[in-house]
Image: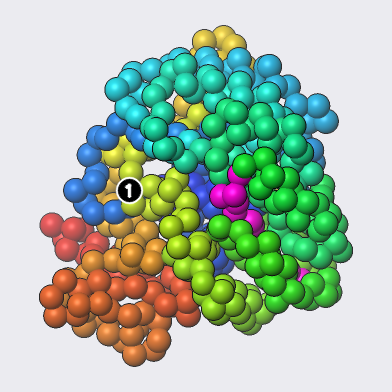
C-alpha cells in the first residue's frame, strides 16, 4: 500500500481496499508510486504523536483470493479452497507473540483486510475475531470491519459476521459494468453488488463502504458517471475511489507490454476524479481524504487512525505495525508466514525507525491528503499562497493558526505539492 523513499518502498501506507486497490489506493498516480499499498500505512501527524503508544487499532491480513484480479499486485494466496484452520492456527500463534503489545490496551478498531477476508466464510471470521478477543480487550463501541467480495455475501455468512461483532463491511465492487468486471477478472457481476448490499442490511450491517475504480481503458466503454450513479443509488455510508494504475507483475502489466491500452489517459484520470468529487459532494458526501468519501459521521475510524498518526498492530502475511517510533512488517508470502510460525521463527521481515526526515515527509503527506489539512508556519503561508491562487488549496486562518487544505484539483497534484513543502521543511533539518 503505501510508497517512496525507503519507508515508502516498504509500503507504509496501509490503505486497504478490498480488492481493491488497497489498503488503500492513492488517487494520484505519482503518489501511488511513492505510497504503495501494503498493510501498514505511513504514519504522520503532529510531531508530538511520535512516541511509543500502545496500539488501539489492529489490522489482520487475510490473503486468500479465488484468483488474481487483472490489476492486483497485493500479497495474496490464490486457493480454490480456503485453508481456514491452517490460517487461524497460525494467526493465533502470531498473536500469542503480541501479548506484550496488546496487554493493557483496548482496541478501538479491528480491520480484516486482504486478500479477501470473506473467503474465510462466516465461521472462519468468527474464529479470527474470537482469537482477537482471547488476547486483547475490544472497546464497547468498536469499529470492526471486514473486506468482502459481493459473491461471498449470503444470509448465513452475514449472521455469523454480526454474531462475531462485525459492524462494517467494505465491499469490493469496482464497477457496475459487467464487461469491465470481466476485464478486471472479478469473480462477481454487477447484479451481485446490489444483492450483497441488501443482504448485509437485512442481516443488520448498514455501515457499508463500496470501492470503485476509475480511469479504465476507453475501449471498455464503461461509463464512469453511470457507475457513480449506480453506487449512489445504493446509498452506501462510505465510498473509496481508486484510479487504475499498472503495477509490475500484474496481468495488465503483461498486456501493456504487448502494446494493449490498459488504462485511461491522464486527462481521463483527472476528469473522472473531478467528476466523482463533484457528484459525491453534491450528494452530501464529505470528500474527507484523497480517495475516500463518507456520509456525515461515517468516516473510516480505522483508516483515519493511520492518517492521524496513531499506532497500530498488524498480523498476517505482509502486515505492518507501528508503535509511534518505528515500523515493522511481516514476510509477505503466505507459505513462508505459515512455515515460520510452524517452526517457531519470527515472521517479522524488517523494521525501521522513523528518522526526522521521514517524519517531516509523512506529516506533510498525511496532512495534505486529508480534509483536516496541515498546520503551516507564517513563513510557509507565503509559499502556499501561490497554490491558493491556482485553486489548488485553501488557507484557513492565515494570520493566526494557518492551516492549508488541498482542493480536489490540488489533490491531483498532491505528490508535487507535498514534495515541495517537505523539501522546504527538510532543509533546516539537513543543515542542522
Ligand atoms: S480480490 Fe482481486 S483485487 Fe482483491 S486482493 Fe484478491 S486479487 Fe487482489
Residue 378 falls inside the magenta stretch: no
Q: Quadrant of residue 425?
A: bottom left
Q: Does residue 50 sit above or below 431 in this rendering?
A: above
In this rendering, would 123 be left or right of 327?
right
Viewer-nearest residue: 251 or 319: 319
Viewer-nearest residue: 382 or 312: 312
Question: Residue drawn at (19%, 80%), measured in percent from left and top?
Answer: 398
Residue at the bottom extreme, as displayed: 389
Question: Residue drawn at (69%, 67%), measured in percent from left and top?
Answer: 233
Q: Using the rendered image of the protein, determine whether residue 37 is visible from the camera's viewpoint.
A: no
In this rendering, would 52 be left or right of 329?
left
The residue at which mark 1 appears reads as 309
Residue 256: x %, y % from top left: 77, 63
Badge 1 residue CB within 8 Å of ligand 1: no
Quadrant including the C terminus: bottom left
Q: Does residue 337 sit above or below 432 in this rendering?
A: above
Q: Does residue 312 sit above or below 428 in this rendering?
A: above
Question: Residue drawn at (45%, 63%), measured in percent from left and top?
Answer: 296
Question: Residue drawn at (41%, 37%), measured in percent from left and top?
Answer: 141
Q: Quadrant of residue 302?
A: top left
Residue 4: x %, y % from top left: 45, 55
Q: Does residue 428 sit above or below 162 in this rendering?
A: below
Residue 364: x %, y % from top left: 32, 62
The stretch of residues the image draws in magenta is 205-217
For disc 1, the neighbor class at 10 Å (few under 14, some 14 to 19, many from 20) is: many
Q: Using the rendered image of the protein, determine whether residue 425 is visible from the camera's viewpoint.
A: yes
In this rendering, would 410 be left or right of 129?
left
In this rendering, would 123 be left or right of 141?
right
Residue 216 falls inside the magenta stretch: yes
Q: Quadrant of residue 142?
A: top left
Q: At numbered mark 1, what does the secondary structure look like: helix, strand or loop? A: loop
Residue 304: x %, y % from top left: 41, 52
Amino acid at each position: 500500500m503505501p510508497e517512496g523513499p525507503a519507508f515508502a518502498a516498504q509500503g507504509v501506507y496501509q490503505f486497504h481496499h478490498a480488492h481493491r486497490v488497497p489498503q488503500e489506493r492513492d488517487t494520484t498516480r505519482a503518489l501511488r508510486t511513492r505510497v504503495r499499498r501494503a498493510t501498514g500505512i505511513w504514519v504522520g501527524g503532529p510531531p508530538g504523536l511520535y512516541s511509543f503508544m500502545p496500539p488501539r487499532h489492529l489490522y489482520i491480513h487475510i490473503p486468500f483470493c479465488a484468483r488474481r484480479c487483472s490489476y492486483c499486485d497485493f500479497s495474496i494466496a490464490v486457493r480454490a479452497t480456503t485453508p481456514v484452520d491452517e490460517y487461524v492456527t497460525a494467526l493465533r500463534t502470531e498473536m500469542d507473540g503480541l501479548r506484550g503489545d496488546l496487554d493493557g490496551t483496548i482496541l478501538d478498531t479491528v480491520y480484516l483486510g486482504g486478500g479477501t477476508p470473506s473467503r474465510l466464510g462466516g465461521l472462519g471470521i468468527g474464529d479470527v475475531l474470537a482469537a482477537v478477543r482471547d488476547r486483547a480487550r475490544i472497546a464497547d463501541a468498536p469499529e470492526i470491519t471486514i473486506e468482502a467480495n459481493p459473491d461471498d455475501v449470503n444470509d448465513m455468512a452475514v449472521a455469523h459476521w454480526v454474531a462475531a461483532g462485525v459492524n462494517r463491511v467494505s465491499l469490493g465492487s469496482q464497477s457496475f459494468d459487467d464487461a469491465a468486471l470481466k476485464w478486471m477478472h472479478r469473480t462477481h457481476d454487477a447484479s451481485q453488488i446490489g444483492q450483497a448490499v441488501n443482504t448485509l442490511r437485512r442481516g443488520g450491517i448498514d455501515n457499508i463502504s463500496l470501492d470503485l475504480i476509475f480511469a479504465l481503458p476507453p475501449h471498455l466503454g464503461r461509463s464512469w458517471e453511470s457507475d457513480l450513479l449506480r453506487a449512489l443509488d445504493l446509498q452506501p455510508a462510505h465510498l473509496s475511489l481508486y484510479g487504475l494504475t499498472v503495477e509490475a507483475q500484474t496481468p495488465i502489466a503483461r498486456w501493456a507490454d504487448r502494446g494493449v491500452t490498459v488504462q485511461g489517459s491522464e486527462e481521463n484520470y483527472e476528469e473522472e476524479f473531478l467528476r466523482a468529487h463533484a457528484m459525491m459532494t453534491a450528494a452530501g458526501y464529505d470528500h474527507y481524504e484523497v480517495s475516500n468519501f463518507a456520509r456525515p459521521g461515517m468516516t473510516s475510524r480505522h483508516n483515519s487512525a493511520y492518517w492521524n498518526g496513531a499506532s497500530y498492530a498488524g498480523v498476517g502475511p505482509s502486515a505492518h505495525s507501528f508503535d509511534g517510533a518505528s515500523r515493522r512488517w511481516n514476510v509477505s508470502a503466505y507459505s513462508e508466514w505459515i512455515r515460520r510460525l510452524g517452526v517457531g521463527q519470527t515472521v517479522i521481515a524488517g523494521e525501521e525507525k522513523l528518522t526526522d526526515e521521514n517524519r517531516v515527509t509523512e506529516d506533510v503527506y498525511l496532512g495534505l491528503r486529508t480534509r483536516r489539512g496541515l498546520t503551516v508556519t507564517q513563513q510557509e503561508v507565503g509559499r502556499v499562497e501561490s497554490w491558493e491562487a491556482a485553486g489548488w488549496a485553501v488557507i484557513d486562518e492565515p494570520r493566526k493558526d494557518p492551516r492549508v487544505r488541498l482542493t480536489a484539483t490540488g489533490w491531483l497534484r498532491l505528490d508535487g505539492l507535498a514534495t515541495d513543502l517537505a523539501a522546504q521543511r527538510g532543509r533546516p533539518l539537513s543543515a542542522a
